[in-house]
Image: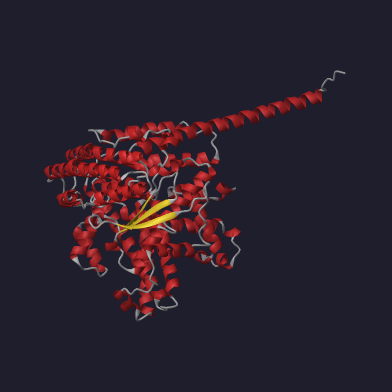
Amino acid sequence: MKRFLSVRQWLFTLILLTSLSAVTLLCYGHVHADAEFEAFAEDFFLQEATANPIHFHYTIDDAGAYRIDEAQLALPVYRAGDAANDAYALSLLAEKLHAFEDRDLSENDRYLYELLCSYTDALRRTAAYPYFAEPLSPSSGAVAELPILLAEYRLDTVQDIELYLSVLEQIPDYLAGLAVYEREKAQAGLFMSDDTADAVIGQCSALMDRGSLEAGTHFLEDTFTDRLTQLAAQGILTEDEVRSYQAQNDRLLTTVVAPAYDRLADELTLLKGNGRDTCGLAHYAGGREYYEALLCLQTGSSREIADIKRLLYSDLEASYAALQQLVRSDAALRDTFVSEPALLPEMSPEGILEQLRQDMAGIYPQIPADADAAPVNCTVKYVDDSLAPYSAPAFYMTPPVDDLSDNVIYINAADTSGDISLFTTLAHEGYPGHLYQTVYCQRYWAKTGITPLRSVLYYGGFVEGWAMYTELSSYGYAAELAKDAHPEAAAYYTACRLDRQIQLCLYSLLDIAIHYDGISLADVRQILASLGMTNDDTAAAVYRYIAQEPCNYPKYYLGYLEILELKKQAADVWRDDRPTTAAQNDDIDKDPGFLYAFHRFLLENGPADFRTLSERLLPEKND
C-alpha cells in the first residue's frame, strides 16, 4: 500500500535535505579551495626549485616524480634591468595570494597561506631597493659558494654526470650575468668598496688556481674523481668511462670555468673606484630603510629597531654580569679560560654526533620515521685547504626533500681546533641542530601531507636561531660528559658559553650600529677597546666583515633570542598544563616535559617568522 508523508515528516525531510545540501556544498567548497591553493603552492615550489639546476639537484632526488626534465634546466642568467623587475613580479605573486584570502582553507593550508603572505611581504620590502644586494660578497657570495656546491653535487647515475658537466658549460653565462648586475650597481652608486673588490678578485684566482688545475690536483678534479670511482665500484661505470669523464671535467674546468672566473675578476678590476670605502648601509640614500627591511627578512623578527636593541642590550648585560660573577667566584677559572684545556674524552666527529643524539633524548622528540623506515645517516667531511680561507667554520649540506637518508656536514679544521669547539659545532650543524631540525621537519611534513613548498621558504632567523639555541645548550652536555674526570669542567664550559653569547650579542649590536646608526671604524675600535679588545687589526676585521655581511650576526643571535622569547610565552600559555615543581618555580629549563613540548611546537610549526609563531602559540589558536 502506498504511504504518504505527513506534514511533520515533510518538514523534517526538507530540513534534512537542506542540511545535507549545505554540508555537501561546504565540504565541496572546502576541498575545492584546498585543491586550488595546493596546486598554486606546488607550482610556486617547482618554479623556485627549477630556477637553478644546482639547487634543484640538491632539493629533488627524483625529478621524474615532479614531471621535470632536469636536462632542460639552466643556470639563471641575469639580464640588464632584471633587479628592477623583481618588485613587479612579487606584486603579481601577492595578487595571486590575496585571491585565497577569504577562501575556506584547511588548517594546514591556512597556515601555509599566512606564511606565504608574510614571506612575500618581507621580500617585497627588500625588492624596493634593487641594487643594495651583494651576490659577490667575499664571505657568502657566488664566487666561493659555487665550487662548494659543485664539489658536493650528487652523482648517482650517468645522467647525473652529464647534468654536472652541462652545469660547468653554463658557468660563463652565469658569471657574466653577475658582472652585468655589478655594473648596474656601479651606475646606481652602490658598487662594493675597492677592498671588497680586491677580496673577490683574489678569490677568483685562488679558487680556480691554474697551477693545481694543470697538475690535476684541484679539489674539483679530486672530488669528481672520487665520485666516479664510487660509481665504478658499483658497476655503473667502466674504467674507460671513468677516464673519459675525467678528461671532460678537466677540460671544462681549465678551458671554460677558470676563464669565466678570470673574466669576472677583470670586470671587477675595471669597476674598482666606483664604490665608497667600506662602510655601513646607513651611509647610502635609502640604506637605513633597506637595512630595516633586510633585518626583518633575514631574522624573521618584526620588532622595531629600538626594541631589538633593548632585547640585545638586556642579554649582553645579563651574560656579562654572569661571567663576571663566575670569574669572581672561581679564582682558577681565569687561567683555565686562557689555556683552553681539552677536557672532553677523545672522540671522532661521528662519535660526538652519536653522543649528542643520546644527550638530547627526552627533551627533543624523535625524528618521525619515513615510509621506508630509512635510517638517517651523516658523513662528516673536512673543507679542502684551498677553500678554508673562504669557508664558514662548518656547514650542513641540506639533502633532497625526497631523500633525507644521507646527510653531509663540512668542518673547517682551521676554525674548529679545540675539543669544545668541535663538540658545539657538531651540535649546531648536526644534533640537535641543522641536521635534526631539517630531517624532522621534512619527515613531519611528508607524514602529515604538508606541501614541500615550506622547504623553499627560507627563514634564516628560525633556522640559525634554532642551531644557535642547540649549540649553546650543548655546553651543558659537554660539562656533564667531562665532569667525572674534570670537576672544573662545569665552570669552564659555562664561561665558554657566556663568552660566546657576549661575542655574538655584541656583534649583533654592532651590526645595527654600523648599518642603521652609521658608526665608523673608529667608533668600533673605541667600543671594542672599552671591553678590553684593543687590537686594531681585530677591530678592523670585525668592522669589515659586518659591513660586508649586513644582518648575518643578528640572523643567528636575534633568532636565538626570539626563540627564548617564544619559550617564555609558551611557559605562560601552557602554565596550567604544567603542574610540576619546575613549572611552579618558573624554572622551565629544568622541566623536561615542557622542553619536549616546546621543541615539538617549534619543529612542527617552523621554520617560520616569529610573529606568526607567536600568534600560533596564543590560546585561541590551540582550542
Relative to 15, residue 215 above or below: below
Asked which colour scheme the image uses, the reply is secondary structure
Image position, residue 602 (x, y; %) = 48, 53
Image position, residue 439 (x, y; %) = 45, 51
Comparing 444 with 67, the one in front is 67
Residue depicted at 38% across the width and 31% down the height: 92
Dividing the picture into quarters, in which one does residue 42 lie? Answer: top left
Image position, residue 326 (x, y; %) = 38, 75
603 to the left or right of 381: right
Relative to 340, residue 34 above or below: above
Comparing 522 with 588, the one in front is 588
Count all numbered tags in the image, as a single digit: 0
The residue positioned farthest toward the right in the image shown: 1
Residue 519 in sight: no
Residue 207 in sight: yes
Relative to 195, residue 318 above or below: below
On-image quarter of the N terminus: top right
The residue positioned farthest toward the top in the image shown: 2
Dividing the picture into quarters, in which one does residue 24 lie? Answer: top right
The residue positioned farthest toward the bottom in the image shown: 331
Image position, residue 247 (x, y; %) = 23, 43
Comparing 453 with 33, the one in front is 453
